[in-house]
Image (cartoon, rainbow, N blue to C red):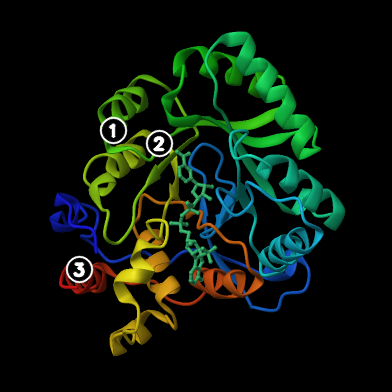
Amino acid sequence: MRITRRRFIGSALAAGAAAPLPQLAAAQAGTNPGGPVVVKPIPSSNELLPLIGLGTARRYENVSAAAEKAVLRDTVARFQALGGKMIDTAPTYGTAEALVGELVAGLGIRDALFLATKVSISGKQAGVDQIEQSFRNLRTKRIDLIAVHNLRDTVVHLQTLRDLRAAGRIRYIGITTSFDRQYPDFEATMKRETLDFIQVDYALDNREAGERILPLARDRGMAVMINLPFGRGRLFKATEGRPLPPWAAEFDCTSWAQFFLKYIVSNEAVTCAVPGMAQPKYADDNLQATRGRLPDAALRKRMEAFIDAL
Ligand SMILES: NC(=O)c1ccc[n+]([C@@H]2O[C@H](COP(=O)([O-])OP(=O)(O)OC[C@H]3O[C@@H](n4cnc5c(N)ncnc54)[C@H](OP(=O)(O)O)[C@@H]3O)[C@@H](O)[C@H]2O)c1
């Protein structure tokens, strides 16, 4: 397991038991195979989002074969059928953004989803052009969220995004990072700007964002989407071959993926997490983290101690 100082930092938000959260019937999404999903509100609108979304970096980036596409189509279909809504992509993820557009259009489920993408280029006009391409790639007239990717030309793009929001073409705006070195600039941007969403890396073995960024988002009324919730699979390697501790049953957890995801979404500042999900069986597993009880403050501490001791 990676040794960083983050491993020794407890979440500042671990104090206080997780409040009961609203539940939304997955029946709204169609087949209702899993029962109600737990949801949290986007602070700027009170719109409700399920705790788990779908990330499209890497596995959706370099796809052309029909057989590969079919697996991803089944994954997206399964995700939505289980009550999932948020799909996170980016114009810089190779084939991902256009593939999401193709799969969602083919499945006819656009209106049941919350599509999030990013602007990821320098320069005002280049940003406008990239965003217009995102509309074409995603095959939609309205994109739910566009965030400035990794703080690239933030001030310039936020103005473009605000104009698009005012015109009703996008619904929410935000910023993203997954780099510690950007945290000071990220925090400064959060203090300076009015944003609907932030997206940042946070995981059971990577808790630094919990110290300042997540409390700041809560204080500033910003929704929080968590990227790299499994540390790109690092947490699965750290726990490989180990059984779940029996106390995982106290928060209705039956797999390591649910263990890692429930830790994240039980942080009161977090709205949702977007694990990379490219297999239907992962959708079954990960969406189960939107169901049942979440760990309270004492259990969260126990989870941190458990992972730190590996
Ligand atoms: N700055 C940014 O804006 C930024 C940066 C990074 C990421 N992101 C977003 O965050 C998303 C998540 O990041 P990520 O995909 O790189 O990393 P991740 O979600 O931390 O980890 C993905 C890994 O977890 C595995 N996995 C997923 N569900 C599983 C399950 N139930 N059981 C076992 N293994 C499972 C996948 O397996 P396989 O290898 O078998 O597929 C993959 O290796 C991205 O897709 C992207 O949307 C945004």
- The structure residue drawn at horizontal position 56% and vertical position 39%, both measured from the top left corner, is 45
Quadrant holding the N terminus: bottom left
Q: Which is more N-terminal, label 1 or label 3?
A: 1
What secondary structure is found at the residue carrying circle 3?
helix
User: Which residue position holds label 1?
Assistant: 183
State the image coordinates of residue 268 (x, y, percent, origin top left). 35, 55
Residue 13 placed where, x, y %? 24, 54
Q: Are marks 2 and 3 in contact (CB under 8 Å)?
A: no
Residue bearing the label numbered 2: 177
Q: Amino acid at mark 2?
A: Thr
Callout 1: helix, strand or loop? helix
> Quadrant location of residue 37?
bottom right
State the residue at coordinates (81%, 59%). 66
On screen, residue 30 versus residue 120, left or right, reads right
Of marks 3 and 1, the one in the foreground: 1
The correct choice, above or below, for 156 with respect to 53 in the image is: above
Q: Secondary structure at mark 2?
A: loop
Mark toward the viewer: 2 or 3: 2
Check residue 247 in the rendering and tell me which mark sits there, or answer none: none
**Label 2 within 8 A of ligand 1 by Cβ:** yes
Q: Amino acid at mark 3?
A: Lys
